[in-house]
Image: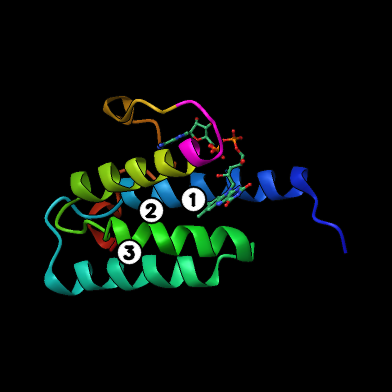
Amino acid sequence: KLGNETVKAELGRATWKYFHTVMARFPETPTEDQKEALRSYIYLFARLYPCGECAEHFMQHLSKYPPQVSSRNAASGWACFVHNEVNAMLDKPEFDCTNLGEFYDCGCGEDDEEGKG
Ligand code: FAD
């Protein structure tokens, strides 16, 4: 079966939105257990990404730029950086990572702020 670039791009957009939102909700000062959870999640995310060619590329990025999980800031900045690596590979413009701010909002309010990670 032929690949479908439109469908692949749609999956990519949905996934990046989710991926960056996970980082935006990661605790500012995570416990060792929360850091380990995020690290494992990122490696499994890469391994299980549905587009096999994308997964392979992304795993290469991971081995070059290991996940940063020490804080929300570190994780969000790292995710922005690796997404930019994918952007560069695909000849897409670089995203300004200083503009991350409130860009990725889960819509879930403050109530469960520290419950994640
Ligand atoms: P996307 O790159 O999907 O970005 C969506 C939105 O996120 C942008 O509109 C912008 O608002 C924001 N954004 C952009 N850059 C950043 C950043 N650095 N940090 C935070 N937010 C940002 N496609 C392939 O053809 N080949 C591949 O090998 C491939 N590998 C992929 C690997 C992974 C893990 C993922 C999730 C996707 C991959 N894709 C790949 C899909 C590709 O990255 C895009 O998602 C797809 O091409 C659609 O691009 P887009 O221009 O709509 O914006």
- Eye-nearest disc, 2 or 3: 3
Q: Quadrant of residue 95?
A: top left
The picture places residue 11, in percent across and down from the top left corner, at 65, 51
Question: Which of the two labelled residues, at mark 2 and mark 3, occupies the earlier sequence position?
Answer: 2
Question: Looking at the figure, which quarter contains the C terminus?
Answer: bottom left
Q: Amino acid at mark 2?
A: Val
Q: Residue at 56% x, 65% y: name it.
A: 49
Asked if the residue under mark 2 is in contact with the one under mark 1, i.e. CB atoms within 8 Å, the reply is yes
Query: Can residue 105 be seen?
Result: no
Give the position of the N terminus as an image quadrant: bottom right
The residue under the point 75% across, 48% down is: 7
Q: Which residue is mark 2?
A: 22
C-alpha gap between disc 2 and disc 3: 21 Å
Q: Position of residue 3 (x, y in %)?
A: 80, 55
Q: Which mark is residue 18?
A: 1
Marks 3 and 1, how far apart in space? 22 Å
Magenta span contains residue 104: no
Q: Residues within 10 Å of mark 1 (few under 14, many from 20)?
A: some
User: What span is colored magenta in the figure?
Assistant: 87-93
| Residue pointed to by mark 3 | 63
The residue drawn where x is 35% and y is 61% is 62
Q: Residues within 10 Å of mark 2 (few under 14, many from 20)?
A: many
Q: In this rendered view, identify the residue nearer to me: 47 or 69.
A: 47
The picture places residue 22, in percent across and down from the top left corner, at 38, 53
